[in-house]
């Protein structure tokens, strides 16, 4: 079984042959069909985030179910599933309250199975972890059954893969975290897979003005095709803020930051009119801080929301986003501009560092 492994954060991906153990209680073995390349993989690759290793990266995948471990119900061999990178424990208070994105019992954060072991080994027997328990840069994987969500009939596998991270993160930030009302004005900083999903979510929610901001001009055209009404090439901060205010009658009701840079986090807060809401979606390197002037923030009753994974309850939200795609209301396929193999991921990372192109998808 081939998989793309890093020894530790900050080192390049190497495609290796690994052995894959059989699924145990509550686990399933899947054959990967497609995996998007997300900036969160790049954060680990570049050493922005401390993570254990060796580890198979990738966390935006779709797969076919192959074999069920003991006690698994609700899944069958041959089914297409989208994989969630935050397998819920289903028992903690957050899960029981229906807030699985805030689960406190998930083994996914340790990149292991629930019993703290791993199903991946090198030929010398050394254990290899799976990023967020799903490590989708692999031809096959054993994952927690709660990570595998069956997709509606007819869902294209590449679309299912993107629902596993960027779509749920971006669309969910709009419709679940912020609950943007029809007629609202919205600005989106950053037009990668996540930011373009925010644009699609804002269009779905009926936002009247959707202002898309990126430093790469070509991204603005894609954003317009997905529903943005205005596009601004980010240069100087003061100019960008003035252009956003111009396009939104003095400032947007909602400002989404989908890059993960302190400078644009600060802009998303500063651009708000009284009563406005900044929604922070992009993840920064560890330790990054941002600041804002407190008096006007409180005086104008502004709000800041953090939104991880778009408040996803995968079992409910993944099929819902897939059905919206099948109904023509979420053109998720438009986010993909390149199909690659496992050997092409380092090159896809290089493109992403330059802000070039849209989503690269590994197909198996
Ligand atoms: N101003 C404006 N746009 C910028 C800037 C900047 N200073 N810096 C980068 N960008 C743009 C890039 O040109 C690119 O279009 O931000 C976009 C980022 O997109 P991707 O690198 O494709 O990242 P994505 O996978 O969408 O993830 C975005 O969300 O979940 C987090 O970890 C993830 O922090 C990352 C963020
Ligand atoms: Zn991701």
Image (cartoon, rainbow, N blue to C red):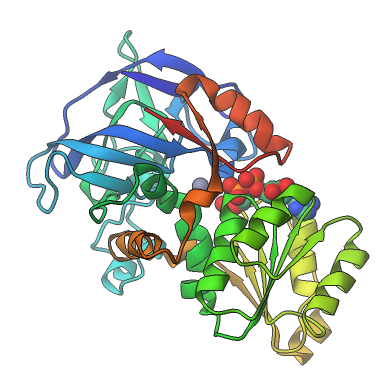
| Percent position of residue 270, x then y | 81, 74
Q: Residue at x 62, y 31 (%)?
A: 349
Please identify the quarter of the rendering in which residue 59 is found: top left
Please identify the quarter of the rendering in which residue 116 is found: top left
How many numbered discs? Answer: 0
| Percent position of residue 217, x then y | 78, 50
Please identify the quarter of the rendering in which residue 245 is found: bottom right
Q: Classify the position of the C terminus by image quarter.
A: top left
Left or right, 338 with respect to 278, comes to left
Left or right, 221 with respect to 152, comes to right
Q: Nearer the viewer, residue 248 or 292?
A: 248
Q: Looking at the image, is 257 positioned above or below residue 10?
A: below
Q: Looking at the image, is 58 positioned above or below residue 332?
A: above
| Percent position of residue 17, x then y | 36, 13
Q: Looking at the image, is 115 positioned above or below residue 173?
A: above
Q: Classify the position of the N terminus by image quarter.
A: top left
Q: Residue at x 62, y 57 (%)?
A: 195
Q: Can I make out residue 258 in this image? A: no
Q: Looking at the image, is 150 positioned above or below residue 52?
A: below
Q: Residue at x 33, y 34 (%)?
A: 33
Q: Can I make out residue 83 in this image? A: yes
| Percent position of residue 78, x then y | 16, 39
Left or right, 264 with respect to 93, comes to right
Q: Residue furthest top?
A: 124
């Amino acid at each position: 079984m081939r998989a793309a492994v890093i020894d530790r954060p900050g080192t390049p991906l190497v495609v290796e042959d690994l052995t894959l153990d059989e699924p145990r209680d509550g686990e399933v073995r899947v054959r990967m069909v497609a995996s998007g390349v997300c900036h969160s993989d790049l954060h680990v690759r570049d050493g922005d985030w401390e993570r254990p290793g060796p580890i198979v990266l990738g966390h935006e995948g779709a797969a076919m179910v192959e074999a069920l471990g003991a006690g698994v119900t609700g899944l069958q061999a041959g089914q297409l599933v989208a994989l969630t990178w935050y397998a819920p424990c289903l028992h903690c208070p957050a899960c029981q309250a229906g807030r699985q994105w805030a689960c406190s019992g998930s083994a996914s954060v340790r990149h292991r199975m629930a019993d703290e072991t791993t199903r991946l080994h090198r030929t010398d027997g050394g254990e290899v972890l799976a990023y967020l328990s799903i490590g989708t840069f692999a031809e096959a994987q054993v994952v927690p059954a709660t990570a595998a969500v069956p997709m509606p009939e007819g869902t294209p596998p590449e679309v299912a893969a993107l629902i596993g991270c960027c779509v749920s993160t971006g669309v969910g930030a709009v419709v679940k975290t912020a609950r943007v009302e029809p007629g609202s004005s919205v600005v989106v900083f950053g037009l990668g897979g996540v930011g373009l999903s925010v644009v699609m979510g804002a269009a779905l929610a009926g936002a009247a003005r959707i202002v898309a901001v990126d430093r790469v001009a070509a991204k603005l055209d894609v954003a317009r095709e997905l529903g943005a009404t205005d596009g601004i090439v980010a240069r100087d901060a003061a100019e960008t803020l003035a252009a956003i205010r111009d396009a939104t009658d003095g400032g947007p009701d909602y400002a989404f930051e989908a890059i993960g840079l302190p400078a644009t986090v600060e802009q998303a807060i500063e651009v708000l009119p009284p009563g406005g809401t900044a929604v922070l979606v992009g993840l920064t390197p560890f330790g990054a801080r941002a600041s804002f002037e407190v008096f006007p923030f409180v005086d104008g009753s502004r709000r800041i929301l953090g939104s991880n994974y778009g408040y996803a309850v995968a079992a409910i939200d993944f099929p819902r986003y897939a059905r919206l795609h099948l109904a023509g209301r979420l053109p998720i396929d438009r986010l993909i501009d390149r199909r690659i193999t496992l050997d092409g991921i380092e090159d896809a990372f290089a493109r992403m560092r330059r802000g070039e192109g849209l989503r690269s998808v590994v197909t198996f």
